[in-house]
Each structure stands twice: as structure tokens, then as C-alpha cells.
Amino acid sequence: MSEKNPIPEKPKKGFAMDPYEPNQIAERVLHVGVKKTRYPWYKTFVLGILGGSFISFGALYELFVLSHPAVGEGTSAVLAPLFYAMGYIIAFIAGAEVFTTNNLSVMGLASGHVSFWEVTKNWTIVLFANLAGAVFIGLLFFFSGLALMFDAAIVETAKVLTAEKMSFGPMQTVIIGTFGNMLICAGLWLAMAGKSLTDQYLALFLPVAAVPALNFQHFTGNMMQFFLALVTEADEVALDLPSQITGWAITQNLFLVAIGNIIGGGVFIALIYYFVFIREKRGKE
């Protein structure tokens, strides 16, 4: 496979201050996506744990702002999504593996550089590694005692958010997941146009922040908050929630959101850009 379909060359940089053009971004995403699918499994898994951990820190930051008694409800609704974006920004710039952004490897599959097995293997490893990272951070946060700050308001917020996310029907959840990863992958696409750390940070910031602000969902971002809501079934933080938080309900939600994420990132971003730039270019060649 590697000799017949080598990793596509990384496009050359132009003038230092100029961003990459759209066709060059497509080539860069293709190059990175193929490279990622060929990492050794243990490297993918470790980077996936880091990805789940970083995004969990962003989700915790969102919970902290939403539940802080000194922050008004209206103010927290505006500010919390901005702090949530921190996790994805760290994960991307630090080179961690995240299931939702790895959906862009559909471009490599469509171009024939990687096989269906390579893509699904990568997604499966990263998905479970992200989950492991989220559970690890959630457990440490819970046992640290910080989860019960502000009279357990952080846990109450996690339960309310979890219940709200699980209150949608199956089709609605898939659509919400589609929207979520369209924004995440669009932000990553913009970041790939930049040539500096500042470019990448600014490109990712608002698209990622828009996901929780608009109540969209993505697999990796849901994990830690769901886990925190599930493991804190204590009397002092019990709530009368609009939907029951159970392991099965959480599993169903994550499955449906993952389907939507694949559609949003893999089809509406990666596949469309493949047909617009990669397929057209190679057809002319």
C-alpha cells in the first residue's frame, strides 16, 4: 500500500506571511490525514489519550465558568463557550489525536491513498483512547474534591447539560452531531491555512466556541461531562432531571453523535473539498 499509494507530498510554502490557498489546504489535509492513519497503533492510542484529556480540560473550564457564583447567568452563557475552545486548540496545536477531527481522513480514503480498514482502525483506536483520556481526567477531578466546589454547582451543571443533550430524539441527535463536527473541522481547515501559531489559534477559536454556544454536540467533547454526571449520583447533588442519566442512555447518545460527526466532518467537509480540489486536480493531471 505504501509503495503503490505513497503519502502525498506536503505543499510548499509561499511568502511567509501569506496563508495557504484553499487548494493547498486540501493537499495539506490530505497529507496529514494519510500520515495519521499510518502511525503505529500505540502512538495513535497515546496521542488519543492526550486528545481526550486536553478536550476534557476545556469542558471542565466551561463547567467552571457556567457554575461560578460570581458570574451572572447571561455572562456565563457568552463566556463559557470561549473557554471551552481551549481544549481543542491545545489538542490541535500540540499534535494530539481526536476522533472528530480525524474524520477528515475520509479525503485520503476517497483519493485511494488509504484503505477503508486503515481509516476504521484509526478511528476506533482514537475513539477509545479519547474515552480513556476523558474518563481519566473525570476521575481525577472527582477524587480531587474540586467537583464539589460552589456547593456542588459544577456537578449540577454537568448533570443539567448532560440531560439536555440526551433529551433529543435519534434523528435530532445525529443532525446536531453533524453540525458540531462541521464547525470543528471547518475550524481545523482554517487553521491549516495558517503558517504561525497565532494564525492557527485565531482560526480555531470561534468555530470551536460556536459548538457549545449553539448547543451542537461532538463525541469527544461530550465524554467528560457525561462521565462526571454519571459518577456523581450523590444525595447532595441529586437533581430532578428532564431525562434519566444512565450508562445506556449515554452510550446511545455518543453513538448517534459519532454518526453525525462522521457525516459533518467526513462528508460535508472532507469529501466535498476532495471533489472540489483533489479529484479535479488529479483528473487534469
Image (cartoon, helix red, strand yellow):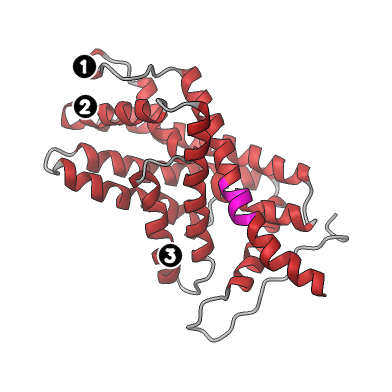
Disc number placed over residue 152 in the picture, else none: 2
Label 2: few (<14), some (14–19) or many (≥20) C-alpha neighbours in 10 Å: some
Q: Which residue is mark 1?
A: 236
- Find numbered disc 3 in the image and state the secondary structure of the residue it sits on: helix
- Label 3, label 2: how many angstroms apart (C-alpha)? 35 Å
Task: Name the residue furthest left.
Answer: 70
| Dominant SS in magenta | helix
- Label 3, label 1: how many angstroms apart (C-alpha)? 41 Å
Q: From this view, report whether residue 236 is shown above or below residue 259.
A: above
Task: Name the residue furthest bottom.
Answer: 15
Report the number of discs: 3
Of the two numbered discs 3 and 1 on the same chain, state the one appearing first in sequence: 3
In front here: 180 or 1? 180
Amino acid type at mark 1: Glu
Asked whether residue 94 is in view, the answer is no
Which residue: 27% across, 31% down?
Answer: 157
Which quadrant of the view contains residue 242? top left
Label 1: few (<14), some (14–19) or many (≥20) C-alpha neighbours in 10 Å: few
Amino acid type at mark 2: Ala
- Find numbered disc 1 in the image and state the secondary structure of the residue it sits on: helix
Q: Are marks 3 and 1 in contact (CB under 8 Å)?
A: no
Amino acid type at mark 3: Ala
Which residue: 56% across, 30% down?
Answer: 255
Label 3: few (<14), some (14–19) or many (≥20) C-alpha neighbours in 10 Å: many
Task: Name the residue furthest right.
Answer: 4
Of the two numbered discs 3 and 2 on the same chain, state the one appearing first in sequence: 2
Q: On the rendered image, what quadrant is the N terminus found in? A: bottom right
Q: Which residue is mark 3?
A: 203
Q: Are marks 1 and 2 in contact (CB under 8 Å)?
A: yes
Residue range of the region highlighted in magenta in the rendering: 264-270
- Label 1, label 2: how many angstroms apart (C-alpha)? 8 Å
